C-alpha cells in the first residue's frame, strides 16, 4: 500500500486563529518569517547576478533562522525553501 500525497486544503480564518492562539508568539512569528523567506528564495531563478545571489543567501539565512525556532517547538513545522530547490 502506498501513501497518497497530501493535498493542501485551506482552513477557515477562525480555525487558524484558534490554532495560533495555542502557540507561543515567537513560534507564530517564526512561521510567518519562514513562509515569507521560502517565497523569496523561490523567486530567484536562472543565472543570478552578485546582488541577486546576496539577496537569495539572505533569504536562505532568514529561513534557516526561522526553521531553527520552529524545529525547537515542533520539527514538523519546518518550511522548505520552495519547489524545485
Image (cartoon, rainbow, N blue to C red):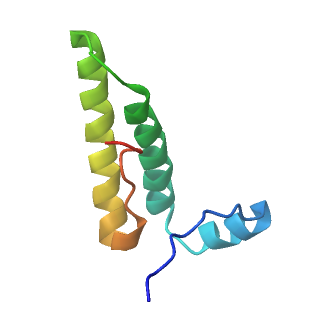
**Looking at the picture, does residue 52 appear above or below residue 18?**
above
| 20 vs 5, nearest the viewer | 5
| 63 vs 39, nearest the viewer | 39
Give the total number of marks visible in the rendering. Answer: 0
Residue in the picture at 63% in, 72% down: 19
The location of residue 42, given as percent across then percent down, is: 41, 34
Residue in the picture at 48% in, 40% down: 36
The location of residue 72, given as percent across then percent down, is: 30, 69
Residue in the picture at 33% in, 33% down: 59
Q: On the image, which quarter does residue 17 sit in?
A: bottom right
Left or right, 12 with respect to 75, comes to right
The location of residue 9, given as percent across then percent down, is: 67, 64
Residue in the picture at 69% in, 72% down: 18
Please state, as top left, top right, bottom left or bottom right, where the C terminus lies in the image.
Answer: top left
Left or right, 2 with respect to 53, comes to right
**Looking at the picture, does residue 76 appear above or below residue 47?**
below
Q: On the image, which quarter does residue 52 sit in?
A: top left
| 54 vs 65, nearest the viewer | 54
Please state, as top left, top right, bottom left or bottom right, where the N terminus lies in the image.
Answer: bottom left
Left or right, 56 with respect to 32, comes to left
Residue pushed farthest bottom?
Answer: 1
Amino acid at each position: 500500500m502506498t501513501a497518497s500525497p497530501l493535498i493542501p486544503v485551506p482552513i477557515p480564518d477562525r480555525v487558524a486563529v484558534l490554532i495560533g492562539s495555542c502557540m507561543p508568539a515567537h513560534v507564530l512569528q517564526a512561521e510567518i518569517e519562514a513562509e515569507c523567506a521560502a517565497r523569496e528564495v523561490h523567486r530567484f531563478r536562472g543565472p543570478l547576478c552578485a546582488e541577486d545571489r546576496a539577496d537569495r543567501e539572505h533569504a536562505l539565512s532568514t529561513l534557516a533562522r526561522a526553521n531553527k525556532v520552529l524545529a525547537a517547538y515542533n520539527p514538523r513545522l519546518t518550511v522548505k525553501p520552495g519547489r524545485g530547490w
